[in-house]
Image: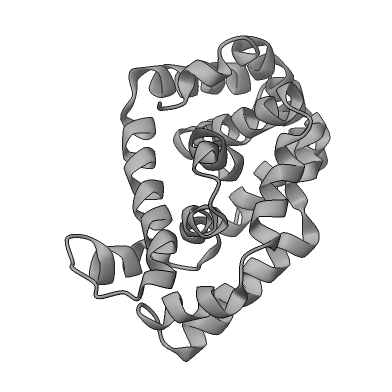
Amino acid sequence: MHFLSHYYIDRHKNNPFFVAGALLPDIAPGFTKTYNSRIRNKDLYLTDDVVPIHEGVLRHYELDAVFHASVSFRESCHKASQRMADEGLDREKYRFWFLSHIAMEVMLDRQLILSDKGLLDEYYRMLNSVDINILERYLNFLVDVEGKSKILINFIRFLEIRFLKHLGTIDGAAEGIVRTVLKATGIRFDEMDRAKLEAALRNIEDDIRYSSKKLLPV
């Protein structure tokens, strides 16, 4: 799932450190490798102040496993691939198995933003209230000094840029998707294909507008 979807599902917990933990796997380079080697099926002897962060990390992977394996998500990705093909995007070039996955996650976050105008501000308020020193102490259990520095820089940058606000427009959603694809695969969208992607996203939005929340795990 994408950033805001993780928050939306567990927003009732009302714990900034839990929210930060759920964010970490998406902003920390290679964090899944760290999770597999240092966290998964391991007993960590953590101090009480960092336990909520750890619980957020565990919850991130728990929800992702359920979400990505769900029939509704797989069917939505298949439909999104059809929408992209209908607009003339190259299935092989843009690796639809990956592109449709990213597009669905971004568009679900967009639907949450459109349906609840205060959700995004609430999310960032939560993250801005996190004591960086406590986050740093948690990272000391997992990564070396260099790795910790990169994660903290990414965390602060995520708060400063507030790029999720751009998902309020289709153009902003497309920008988030093309940047993710470029970073993950090295593949660039030219101007024409970017326009095709935006057209596909409008159709994808029509497909999920009234069912988006039903796609999320409960």
Q: Position of residue 56 (x, y in %)?
A: 42, 54
Q: In this image, 59 relative to 188: left or right?
A: left
Colouring method of the image: one colour
In this orientation, which residue lies closer to the viewer: 80 or 151?
A: 151
136 to 75, vertically: above or below: below
Asked which quadrant contains residue 107, the reply is top right
Name the residue at 79% across, 59% down.
161
In this orientation, which residue lies closer to the viewer: 93 or 5?
A: 5
Q: Position of residue 84 (x, y in %)?
A: 61, 23
Name the residue at 49% across, 68% down.
29
Q: Quadrant of the C terminus?
A: top left
In this orientation, which residue lies closer to the viewer: 94 or 150?
A: 150
Name the residue at 38% across, 40% down.
64
Name the residue at 56% across, 12% down.
211
Q: Is residue 101 visible?
A: yes
Task: Tell how many labels.
Answer: 0
182 to 197, vertically: above or below: below
- Residue closest to the far bottom: 145
43 to 57, vertically: above or below: below
In this orientation, which residue lies closer to the viewer: 42 or 94?
A: 42
Q: In this image, 175 relative to 54: left or right?
A: right
Q: Is residue 174 visible?
A: no
Asked which quadrant contains residue 54, the reply is bottom left
- Residue closest to the far front: 48
35 to 217, vertically: above or below: below
Q: Position of residue 77 (x, y in %)?
A: 48, 24
Q: Position of residue 12 (x, y in %)?
A: 52, 37
